Image (spheres, coloured by chain):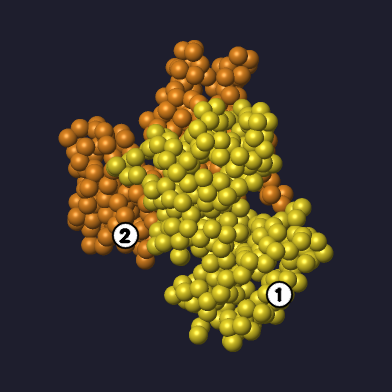
Chain colours: A orange, B yellow
């Protein structure tokens, strides 16, 4: 059976899938690691070997995704300061001793490709995606083309301006969406009342009016960013995933309302707002599709 | 001599060029019209005929650009409410009785293509452009691909959020860049002191400190928007054109400073800020290139 291997290297675990060109999943693995001394590199190589052994034949192609900016030649992650020491510049085709080139993608780019291939954005050509977690990640596809850009950083949608007089974030963006929605700023923006977005959402769901007001501030910020980005990227749909998206209707109902308020509905066009479907494995599926598309 | 005809329909004049595939200009015409009773359509057809007569041979291809959103099949402008009555849905291939299809582009998209072919962005694959005038227009190219989007509205860069609690603009965007930089809001944002940006810039250039403060507010707004969009579109260069860009160093010197302040210089990458070079004819050249690329 012909199959692809898609492997997504996260910050603390490796997600891998063996999947047919038609999108049928043959195997799915989530393997944790400690970010120390290249443990991730050793484990990932062993995992790729094991999955291929279990399938009884080598994969027709292997695709990788990882945090950081992918190199132009797609053989490595070129830029990833501070974490996963050794990742920068590692040539995955060599590291996996693969018979064919192993293309490497940024993890958010891969997650969007996964959702386009087999998830919420199936078959769409104009779509962008937010991943709401510790920070706010993103990726964008326009006219069927995944946006990469000059150094592979296109689609960092968490770092768009909402309040141009606000404090700068890690990327020098003033008052960025990440500050209004990223979990890492939750204590700061709630005056220390909540330590995690999960706690805030739980309070909203239990009927706490003050919590609801704080939460709607974040949701409105996301809605305004989506309205703004619709003018730049002109999507048919916007996908929202990541841990915070598990809030479900508590997120999506008010978000829908805010997007309609801030959206330029040119010619009556309305962008759909959809929850991501592939969860933690989106990047792995996207990596598999990325290698499949090269055949 | 093989040549292309590129024709840009503006709000009050038609710009046309006859240009060789190598980019040599054979003719350049700017013909005014009154937006009444299809005068623009009649004049444009006559102009196309005249230019071809003068060249002594039919053009190898004709490309058109115009305000509004171009249809997916590129045969017409699908959406242009309020102005140029009759433009919506007009099939240019038929109207010009052309032997080959006449592709139609949005005017801002065409201007960017022109600058990429023969102007400030020559040879670049990752670039976006602002046109600073009555409003703030824009267009973007990523990985060599001109962004069009679901309904052809991608690249409306004047309608990005800077102040998410600000008033909505015509596109429902709160506190958008257009409000901080578009000439149509100049009286409003200067408390009535200036009727045009030209007057404000003249006051700055004559050493008026209060004028300078007002002006730098607009320039900083543009710089913050560029910093934000760099994270989305990852350009090698940002082109700035339109009437307000004639302010020259009065615009570009502080703009450069603000962009450096708000830019994520990942891996030391710095986006160039460049003045547009083709002026009013950028759209005409871009339209010619658009048809040339189809051969």
Q: Nearer the viewer, mark 1 or mark 2?
A: 1
Q: Position of residue A25 (x, y in %)?
A: 42, 52
- Chain bearing tag 2 is A
Cα–Cα span, label 1 and label 2? 54 Å
Residue A36: quadrant of the picture: top left
Label 1: few (<14), some or many (≥20) within 10 Å? some
Callouts 1 and 2 close, C-beta under 8 Å = no
Is B62 situated left or right of A55 in this image? Answer: right
Q: Vertically, is A205 above or below B196?
A: above
Mark number, residue A98: none
Q: Residue furthest front?
A: B206
Viewer-closest of B269 and B184: B184
Q: Vertically, is B27 above or below A264?
A: below
Q: Residue at x 64, y 40 (%)?
A: B196
Q: Residue at x 45, y 17 (%)?
A: A187
Q: Secondary structure at mark 2?
A: strand
Q: Secondary structure at mark 1?
A: helix
Q: Is residue B213 visible?
A: no
Q: Residue at x 54, y 22 (%)?
A: A201
Viewer-closest of B41 and A160: B41
Is A198 situated left or right of A210 in this image? Answer: left
Mark number, residue A61: 2
Mark number, residue B45: 1
Q: Residue furthest bottom?
A: B56
């Amino acid at each position: 059976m012909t199959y692809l291997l898609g492997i997504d290297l996260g910050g603390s675990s490796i997600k891998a899938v063996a999947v047919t060109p038609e999108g049928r999943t043959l195997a799915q693995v989530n393997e944790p690691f400690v970010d120390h001394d290249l443990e991730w590199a050793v484990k990932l190589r062993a995992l790729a070997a094991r999955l291929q052994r279990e399938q009884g034949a080598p994969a027709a192609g292997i695709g990788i995704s990882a945090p950081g900016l992918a190199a132009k030649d797609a053989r490595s992650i070129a830029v990833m300061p501070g974490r996963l020491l050794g990742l920068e510049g590692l040539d995955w085709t060599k590291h996996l001793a693969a018979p064919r080139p192993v293309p490497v993608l940024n993890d958010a780019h891969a997650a969007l490709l996964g959702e386009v291939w087999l998830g919420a954005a199936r078959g769409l050509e104009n779509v962008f995606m937010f991943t709401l977690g510790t920070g706010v990640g993103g990726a964008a596809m326009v006219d069927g083309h995944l946006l990469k850009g000059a150094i592979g950083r296109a689609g960092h949608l968490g770092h768009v301006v909402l309040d141009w007089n606000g404090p700068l974030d890690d990327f020098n963006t003033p008052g960025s969406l990440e500050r209004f929605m990223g979990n890492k700023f939750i204590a700061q923006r709630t005056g220390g009342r909540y330590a995690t977005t999960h706690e805030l959402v739980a309070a909203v769901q239990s009927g706490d009016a003050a919590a609801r007001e704080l939460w709607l501030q974040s949701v409105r910020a996301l809605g305004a960013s989506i309205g703004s980005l619709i003018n730049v990227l002109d999507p048919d749909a916007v996908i929202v995933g990541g841990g915070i998206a598990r809030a479900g209707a508590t997120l999506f109902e008010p978000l829908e309302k805010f997007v309609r308020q801030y959206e330029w509905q040119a010619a009556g066009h309305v962008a759909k707002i959809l929850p991501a479907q592939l969860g933690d494995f989106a990047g792995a599926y996207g990596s598999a599709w990325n290698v499949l598309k090269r055949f």
